[in-house]
Every structure is written in structure tokens, then in C-alpha cells.
Amino acid sequence: MFLKPSVLNRLMKQAYKKGLTLAMNEEGWLYIASDWWQVNIHKDFIPKRTLGDIITLTGELPKPGERFVTTKTEGNQMEMELPLEIEESGFEENNLLTVTDLMLIGTQGTIQRLVQDEDTGHIYAVNNVFIDIIDNSQIDVREGEHPVREPLYNPIRGVLWKNNVCKLRVHFRSDDKNAKIMQNIKGIDITPGVLKEC
């Protein structure tokens, strides 16, 4: 799994306050989601620490074909006929984003990292926690896990990082406080190599 377990645990705890969704598909992929992020991990590659964090919060893992939403106050509530995994349609292999070194501070102090499509020049903002959570040193190379590369994106559906055993999908951030800045830098190449040359 290319995700830092400590950061994933923090995200799960935050989501648990309003509703953390868990599901398992028939192929053994665990789905973990909040309103604005989703993770899929193949069960054979879930770190023991992450399994323990999930059990501590929810008391159980979903069985294949099951999905539930869980909160501290309402416990685990089964959900029917809803997705059991991340929907990847719309994320084309040639739509890649470059993570830049530029960050913006949002209205509520949220740090947003700017990412750019080098081909089109389009710039988007992603919560910086999702840049920090990516860590290829966490992958299990001996068991055949591949490193994660640049994220795929869809202008409407957000960003998708994936390898052969793990996926992370997040929504873009929008913030009225930074709307003018985003408009002013539109079309400017802000990728790391260019910034160093300036």
C-alpha cells in the first residue's frame, strides 16, 4: 500500500465523525471512503496497523459483497446497491498531473497543493494531505507491488493515484478565497523544473 498508515488513520477518524463508508467487493478489494476521498486496497496488501485502525473504529470488516457506513453515535448501518469500489471511468491513462511546489491557504486554514496538467496548462488544487499521504517506501516490492506514479485526473471527477494493489481518489478543492489567484496563474507553467529556472 502506497499510503502512510498514520495519515490514513487520521483521515478515517475524521470521516468517522460524520460517516465512514466501508465495503468489500467479491475480488477482495476493501473500499474506504468519506464524502471527498476514496481508497481501495487489496486485502492481501492491507498493513496490520491499518486493519487494527479499522477494527478499532468500526469493530469489523465488511464481508465480500457488503457495504456499511459507520459513525460513533449510530454504529454500522448496512447500505444496499451502492458502489463497492472506486469508479475509475473517466480517468484516462494520458491525463496526468504534475504535483507542484506551490501551496495556497484556504479559508479555514486548509493547505491546498497546486497540481498542473503540463499538456494543457490547467491548474487544480488538491488538499495537501493527499500529497503527504503518498509514500512509495510503504509498498511491498517483494510481494509484487508497483510504485505509484503521477496521478491521473478528470476535470470533473478529481484525481486518482493507483498501482496494482491500491487506489486513492480525491476531489479537487475549490475556495472562493483563492479564486482570483487561480484565475491569475491560469496557463502559466508552474511545474517544479520551470520554477527553479526562474
Image (cartoon, helix red, strand yellow):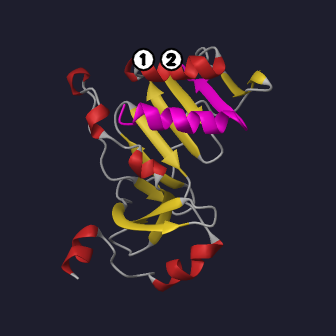
Q: Is residue 16 visible?
A: yes
> Residue 122 at what x, y percent from top left?
43, 73
Vertical position of residue 50 compared to residue 153: above or below: above
Q: Which residue is mark 1?
A: 48
Cβ atoms at labels 2 and 1 below 8 Å apart: yes
Vertical position of residue 141 compared to residue 10: above or below: above
> Which residue is farthest front?
109
Q: Which residues are magenta?
A: 1-27
Dot 2 falls on a residue whose secondary structure is helix
> Residue 11 at what x, y percent from top left?
55, 39
The residue at 33%/72% (across/down) is 119
Q: What label does residue 16 carry, if any? A: none
Dot 1 falls on a residue whose secondary structure is helix
Q: Which residue is mark 2?
A: 52
Q: Nearer the viewer, residue 27 or 136?
A: 136
Q: Quadrant of residue 190?
A: bottom left
* Left or right: where 24 falls relative to 82: left
